[in-house]
Structures are given as structure tokens and as C-alpha cells.
Amino acid sequence: MSVSPPDVPTVDRTSVPIERALNGLLDVLSARSGNRVSTSDLLDAMHGAANAARAVTAARFREPLDVDDKAPGDTFDPVTDADRDAETAIRDALAVRFPTIAFRGEESAASPTPGDATPSGPSWVVDPIDGTRAFITGIPVWGTLIALNDGHEVVLGLLDQPILGERYVGTPTEATLHRGGSVQRLKTRGGRMLAEASLCCTTPDMFNAGAERAAFDRVAALARLVRYGGDCYAFAQLAAGQVDVVVESDLKPWDIQALVPLIRGAGGVVSDWSGGRAEQGGQIVAAGSAALHAEVLARLAG
């Protein structure tokens, strides 16, 4: 039986403020370059960077890898030579097209360019291989994530899955799937509450024992179907209308920023567990509709 959720805070789903932010960024970049910069120019740069990363990751997938542990003595946190080389390829490709936009990658952290040394300026936020554990075990649910943040808002996002030949792009007004030379507009699946919903989570081990795990378990207990192991690809399937809810924790900015425009552009809602902004990561919930999102927030809150 569907449950009507109580009123809870939620994020603003309108695209107008994000469109305004993107237009303001275009004005800044145009002034810097002396030529008019368009949204298409930015998207072309992102596609070019994703292609450069794809050349690295597709060639290394299911091949011998050099694997290091970024957190020895703690939970295994792998990074491979493919992660590092793909990030370098992305960074180099973006720098050619837009040298004044700062770069923030998972494997190199914050590294502003000389043209933009302030933390509030525009930046690319990149995870070269989101789902490295899936990558090193030969499971194609990892992806390359590229976001463009104007300093306050994430205005564009891209997820590339080279092995499946799928590329997902989010803008302030739409989300699209690029596959096999065709472009398909995406829309989340509405009309479902938690009792009818498919819920994805990368692993229940990401939740701290105690209150955080208990909160997730309250949501999972009410969902019709729960699947683990999706990494960033679960968010793509939410945008495509195949998944209804994704609940995660302990995410970093580069894990989520590229996915925010994708979810919103497809008509979904993404926030932290309190209904606030998702861009800085942490505890994240994404849903295919505002009603479902509100119900999940209520269950997380207890």
C-alpha cells in the first residue's frame, strides 16, 4: 500500500536558476576568450574529454592493471594506472579548449589553472573512473564523470560508459542518452511510491553502523526491489526510468556533481538526506519524482 509522506523540506527542482547560472558562465568565458562561447562549445569540450578518457579505459578494461590502495590499513580504496591516465587525458583535453577553467579531479584533487585561482570560480569536476572496484573486477557499471561547476551551481554533467557504448548528458533543460549515433531524451519514471519502487545502492557497507545504517534499512524494507553494486550507472538508470530511487553515503563532490544535471534534466530530484544541496556529496538520495523523494526523506529521518 502506498504511503502519503508528511511534509519535508526538499530542493528546488526548477531549471530557471541553473539556466541563469549557465548563461552567466557563458558571459564570463566569452569575456575571457574574446569570442562568444556557447553551451554547444562546452558540451563539445566535454565530449572530446570523454572520448580521450574512453581511449584509455576501454583499452585497459579486463586487462592487467597496476592497483594501489589509497587508504592502506582502512577499507580497501583502489586506484589504478587507468584512473590516473584517464584523468590526465581528460585534463589535457579540457585545457586545450578552455584553459582558464580550473580542474578538480579525484586523483589530483584541487588544482586551479593560472587563469582561475579562486575556489569560487568555474571548474571542471572529474572522476575518471567512478566505480574502480567494478572496473578492476570486470563489471561494466563504472563510468567517467565530467561536471562543469560555475562556482556555485553544477550547470552541465556527463557520464560515459565506454563498454556499453552509452553516454549520458545533463543540461539545465534536458537529459539525453547518446548511443550508436542516436540521441534519446530521457525521462524518469513517475507515479511510484516506495512500495512500488526499485531502489539501488552501491553497497550497504558504505553506511556507518548505527543510525545511518538504520535509516537506510528503513527505506530498503519498504521498497519493492533492492539492488546493490550500481555505482554511478544506477543514477543513469534512474534518469532513464529504469530505477526509482538511489540512496548513497560517503560520496565526494566528484562522485555526484556530474549526475546532478542528469537527474534533474530527466525530471528527477537529487539532494542530501536533509533535502539540501547534493553538490558537496556526503549522504545522497535521488528519486524519479518529487513525491517519492519526499517519502524517502521522511523514512530516512525516522
Image (spheres, helix red, strand yellow):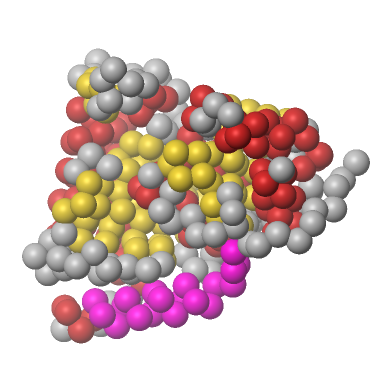
The reply, left or right, for residue 5 in relation to residue 63 is right
- The vertical placement of 277 against 249, above or below, is below
Instruction: Please provide the residue range marked out in magenta.
Output: 11-29
The reply, left or right, for residue 182 in relation to residue 62 is right
Residue at the image point whose x is 75% and y is 30% from the top: 221
Task: Return the x and y of residue 233 as percentages of the image width and height.
Answer: 50, 38
Residue at the image point whose x is 25% and y is 27% from the top: 70
Task: Return the x and y of residue 228 as percentages of the image width and height.
Answer: 58, 27
Q: Can residue 156 be seen at all in this image of the molecule?
A: yes
Q: Which of the 4 image quadrants contains residue 195?
A: top right
On the rendered image, what quadrant is the C terminus found in?
top right
Q: Is residue 135 magenta?
A: no
Magenta-colored segment: predominant secondary structure: helix
Name the outermost residue toward the right.
1
Q: Which of the 4 image quadrants contains residue 107?
A: top left
The reply, left or right, for residue 9 in relation to residue 250 is right
Name the outermost residue toward the front.
210
Q: Is residue 14 magenta?
A: yes
